[in-house]
Image (cartoon, helix red, strand yellow):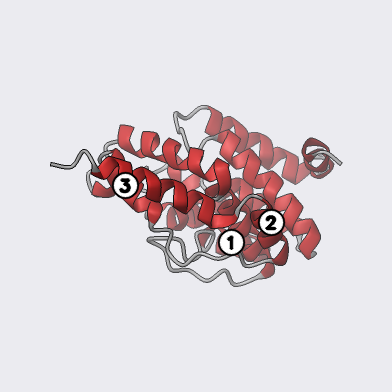
Amino acid sequence: MTAGTRLKKYLEIKRIKNLHDQVKMAFEQCDLVAHSWDHIYRDTINAIWIGEAEGADMEIVLPAILLHDIGFLHNPDPSVHNVIGAQKGADWLGAWSDAGKKKISDCILCHKGKTAGFDTEPPSLEARVVHDADLLEKIGKIGILQGVRSYIEFGQRGLTDHQDYKDLQAIVKRRVDFGSAVFLTRTGKEIADRRGGILIRRDFFRDLLTELEEYET
């Protein structure tokens, strides 16, 4: 079954279809580079692959993964986007119960796990699925590209409180430090291993940093 076919199955559920379309429109209307709709789409497919294999509640996983980066629609600061996203998520979830909203909010809040600059603990299977779905975007060759796109996005936005985004060398140093992030589901780890894991990205940015150091004065 193709990725598109898997997603189409869930879009037959009215509340998921409505949320998907609203989120897609919102992200397509913004000028985000790294955290754009194509990132959300790939994360959504990742979440389907992982969530189905792990037996997660997909009506919690899918809204959470669709909304996990909505914090960027309100504030460009990456250090708070998970908190803002968790707070704003309820505005999009009128079709879910209060208990469902809480579970989804927890997924959004903790989706960064232990990546550099974050220290959260996904509290449920669904939250671990969302975490791993997003972490897959940070590894392998896609992770390298996303690192470059993050440099463009945050650099253009002039994040004066984050000097680690001020120039190419600063952001490469940040990309070498990946924190203590690990995959929290068996399926996420298996997919990551097929893509070369975290090391392929870390090694690329480490080699790039070595080249850039030749330009230091």
C-alpha distance separating marks 2 and 3: 40 Å
C-alpha distance separating marks 1 and 2: 8 Å
Q: Which residue is mark 1?
A: 107
Give the vertical position of 145 relative to 132 (above or below). above
| Residue kind at label 1, given as amino acid type | Cys
Place of residue 166 in the rendered image (x, y in percent of width and height, measured from the top left): 25, 41
Q: Residue 97: in sight, yes or no?
A: no
Q: Earlier in the sequence, mark 3 or mark 1?
A: 1
Question: Which one is in front in this view, the residue at disc 2 or the one at disc 3?
Answer: 3
Instruction: Quarter of the image for the N terminus: give it.
Output: top right
Q: Residue at x 70, y 45 (%)?
A: 45
Image disc number at residue 78: none
Q: Nearer the viewer, residue 200 or 177?
A: 200
Q: Earlier in the sequence, mark 1 or mark 2?
A: 2
Q: Residue at x 60, y 38 (%)?
A: 23
Q: Secondary structure at mark 3?
A: helix
Q: Nearer the viewer, residue 208 or 7?
A: 208
Q: Is residue 213 left or right of residue 140?
A: left
- Marks 1/2 in contact by CB < 8 Å: the verdict is yes
Place of residue 137 in the rendered image (x, y in percent of width and height, measured from the top left): 57, 47
Q: Which residue is mark 2?
A: 61
Place of residue 130 in the rendered image (x, y in percent of width and height, measured from the top left): 62, 57
Q: Which residue is mark 3?
A: 210
C-alpha distance separating marks 3 and 1: 37 Å
Place of residue 199 in the rendered image (x, y in percent of width and height, measured from the top left): 52, 56
Q: Is residue 150 left or right of residue 12?
A: left
| Residue kind at label 3, given as amino acid type | Thr
